[in-house]
Image (tube, rainbow, N blue to C red):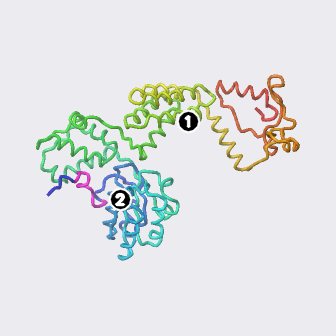
Amino acid sequence: MINPSIPLAERVRPQTLDDFTGQAHLAGLDAPLRRMAAQGNLPSLIFWGPPGVGKTTLAHILANEARLPFFTLSAVQAGVKDVREVIEKAKAGGKALLFIDEIHRFSKSQQDSLLGAVEKGIITLIGATTENPSFEVIRALLSRCQVFILQELGKEDLRQMLAQAMAKDPWLLAKKIVLREDTALLRLSGGDARRLLNLFELVVQSAGTQEVEITDELVLQIAQQRMAQYDKDGEAHYDIISAFIKSMRGSDPNAAVYYLARMIEGGEDPLFIARRMLILASEDIGNANPTALVMANSCFQAVQAIGYPECRILLSQTVIYLACSAKSNASYMAIEEALKTVRQTGDLQVPLHLRNAPTRLMKELDYGKDYQYAHQFEDNFVLQEFLPKLLAGTRLYDPGRNAREQELRDFLKRRWKEKYGY
């Protein structure tokens, strides 16, 4: 008897590696996971990949293969207490396999609570994450696990899953289903097998008949409106904002506006988008076009005042302007080089002639003595030392190769050619 409350993706979840679709580099013939399962030697693992590509399914299959007591925790709901309870149960039985979904949501203290049991082999850990484990999993735990990267599913993988579901699920077998077109199903799934199967089930249910002919038009009609794949708390968030920034940096307004639309459609905070453009205007354009920062700041202020939906027009205008602007990261590189220099050289003494002298004692110690006030000299410039003695002649700013910064280079060459080599 089929329980209608259980989604199709769960009902047809593969139970063996032979039934598993996709990730051939991990689960195919002579692939690492298959060899581990065959040898019965399963180390602790981290599965890293986008949603709906088989991380949870592989964990269940490996648990079956290992024939160990199996515990599962969701990092969203579980805490240190839950982890300790599993460890105690594992000790009582000798060994157990613990699957933690969304392990990147565990805090450092929660991840620390796993270390001893993993190190001693009391539990074999399988963690699933959509985030880069290098950033989200503590180093001590990461060093005790093998990381496997799961790839986005291709069209043929998804088609095979649909065919398996139609051939396997009794509820679907009871109907006469003709899959006339699958383009809309595949596109709306976004490469997520869980989403694909549950959307397919929704379409069949919504048809309300025993005979169902699935077309792209029917799928779109039932799905009504496609929401772009965009999880503000997940990896897609970072991937899309990264692509957005890199498209503007790469001077491609078409790609930049596309990723802007992805974020708008996904409900991203418009101030977050405007804030990122403010950063780009300085980091990637800088003095090649100082107006870019003015534009980005005006956009940020206007977005605060207007909000959605109208602010999408302001965002688009600014995105296109920034993408089409001359580029320079010279200011960014200058501060990075300056910070590096400070870290390497420490707190060097400020030259005496540049020091403030608000007290009599400071004046007696020659604070501010011999300082030359630039405005008293021709062209408002006088050659004097501003850096600490140890850093004299150190050039931190190298103007970019663009028209605006060439003017700055010419200015600096007239003033500082002998000292800084411009």
- Label 1 and label 2: CA atoms lie apart by 48 Å
Residue 405 horizontal/vertical position (percent):
67, 27
Residue linked to disc 2 = 29
Image quarter in which the N terminus is found: bottom left
- Packing grade of label 1 (10 A; few <14, some 14-19, many >=20) is some
Q: Quadrant of the C terminus?
A: top right
Residue drawn at point x = 85 percent, y = 44 percent:
361
Q: Is residue 39 visible?
A: no
N-term-proximal mark, 1 vs 2: 2
Residue 78: image x %, image y %? 38, 60
Q: Which residue is mark 1?
A: 279
- Which amino acid type is shown beneath numbered disc 1? Ile
Asked which quadrant contains residue 330, the reply is top right
Q: Nearer the viewer, mark 1 or mark 2?
A: 1
Which stretch did the figure color magenta? 6-17
Identify the residue at image location x=42%, y=32%. 258
The dot on residue 333 is: none
Image coordinates of residue 221 in percent, x first then y, are 22, 34
Please indicate, yes or no, whether residue 390 appears anywhere in the rendered image: yes
Amino acid type shown at disc 2? Leu
Front in this rendered view, residue 33 or 68: 68
Q: Label 2: few (<14), some or many (≥20) within 10 Å?
A: few
Query: In the drawing, does residue 59 fall left or right of residue 322?
Result: left
Reply above or below: 419 against 174: above
